[in-house]
Structure formats: structure tokens, C-alpha cells
């Protein structure tokens, strides 16, 4: 199931507000969208792959927390969301709990060395992820922030 680029982040609010006094009735809370995505996976167990790339940065952290115990999703693509280290910590927490996911694509998220260290430590517990491509974009960005050459990353 692919939702790439479908999320209009300008219509997401940080908190749930059932009694909306704002002028925009189509504003959705981040938590509500994350819960809806979790419900979609729960009620449609034949969804084995989910792609939430390009614009889901606010939704991914609460969504990862909610789907950690999911036992049907095999592939998750969450690249290009500018998750940063905080998002990486959420990824690592999800990986510590989830033992079904086998493919995770999460490059192009501005994750630094601390974030990737956290993700790598999760693999001491998680033995099911068999495909996590090397994060070339994030590694190059991290190397440049230290003034190192990206050729040192190979």
C-alpha cells in the first residue's frame, strides 16, 4: 500500500481536538492519522508492505509506537520524512518490540550518527529485519557535518 506524498502536512495539527474552533474543519491531528493508519493495518491484515514517504515526518513517530506489536506488516518504507535522531529513536524502539518486519527503508531522514547507532543497537534484539539498505544520504550528510569526505564512508 503506497501513500507516498499523499499527506498534506499543512493540514496536520499537533494535538487532537475534537471540538475544533479553528476555521479549518479539515485539519487532522497527527495522533488521529497515526491511529487511522494502525487501524487500517489491523483491519486489513493482508497488507504486507506500507510506504509512507515524502511528507509523513510528523506522523511516523506516533505511528511507529502504535504498530510496534504488529504481526502482519513485512515491509515499511519511511524515507524522505526528515525524522532526524528523534525519529531514529522511535524506529529503534519499534524494532525492539516488532519481530515480524523484514524490510525497512528509512534513508533520507536527516538521521545523524546517534540515531543510526540507536537503530543498530536495536538489532541486538531484532533478528527479523533482513533488508535495511545502507543509508547513503544520511551518512553523507553526517560526514559533511564533521567536515569528513563522503568517500570515507565506503
Image (spheres, helix red, strand yellow):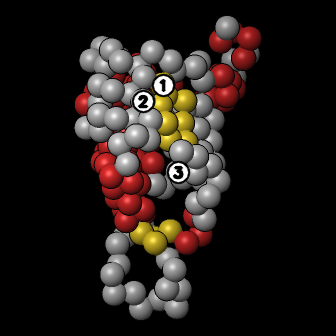
Which residue is tagged 2? Answer: 74
Q: Secondary structure at mark 3?
A: loop
Q: Nearer the viewer, mark 2 or mark 3?
A: 2
Q: Secondary structure at mark 2?
A: loop
Query: Mark 3 Cα within 10 Å, few/some/many (few <14, many 20+)?
Result: many
Q: Position of residue 9 (x, y in %)?
A: 58, 64
Q: Residue at x 62, y 42 (%)?
A: 80
Q: Residue at x 58, y 51 (%)?
A: 3
Q: Nearer the viewer, mark 1 or mark 3?
A: 1
Q: Position of residue 61 (x, y in %)?
A: 40, 47
Which residue is tagged 3? Answer: 57
Residue 94 in sight: no
Q: Quadrant of residue 73?
A: top left
The answer to whether mark 2 and mark 3 are in CB contact below 8 A is: no
Viewer-nearest residue: 41 or 13:
41
Image quadrant holding the C terminus, namely top right
Give the Cα separation between the discs numbered 1 and 3.
19 Å
Above or below, 19 against 122 in this view is below
Give the Cα separation between the discs numbered 2 and 3.
21 Å
The answer to whether mark 1 and mark 3 are in CB contact below 8 A is: no
Which residue is tagged 1? Answer: 103
Give the Cα separation between the discs numbered 1 and 2.
6 Å
Query: Which of the two discs, 2 and 3, labels the residue nearer the N terminus?
Result: 3
The answer to whether mark 1 and mark 2 are in CB contact below 8 A is: yes
Amino acid at each position: 500500500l503506497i501513500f507516498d506524498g499523499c499527506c498534506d502536512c499543512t493540514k496536520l495539527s499537533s494535538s487532537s481536538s475534537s471540538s475544533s474552533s479553528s476555521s479549518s474543519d479539515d485539519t487532522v491531528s497527527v495522533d488521529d492519522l497515526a491511529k487511522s493508519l494502525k487501524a487500517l493495518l489491523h483491519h486489513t491484515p493482508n497488507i504486507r508492505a506500507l510506504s509512507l514517504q515524502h511528507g509523513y515526518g510528523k506522523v511516523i513517530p506516533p505511528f511507529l509506537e502504535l504498530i510496534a506489536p504488529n504481526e502482519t506488516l513485512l515491509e515499511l518504507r519511511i524515507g524522505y520524512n526528515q525524522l532526524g535522531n528523534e525519529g531514529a529513536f522511535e524506529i529503534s524502539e519499534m524494532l525492539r518490540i516488532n519481530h515480524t518486519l523484514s524490510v525497512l527503508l528509512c534513508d533520507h531522514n536527516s538521521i545523524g550518527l546517534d540515531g543510526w547507532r540507536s537503530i543498530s543497537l536495536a538489532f541486538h534484539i531484532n533478528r527479523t529485519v533482513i533488508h535495511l539498505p545502507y543509508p547513503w544520504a544520511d551518512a553523507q550528510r553526517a560526514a559533511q557535518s564533521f567536515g569528513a569526505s563522503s568517500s570515507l564512508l565506503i
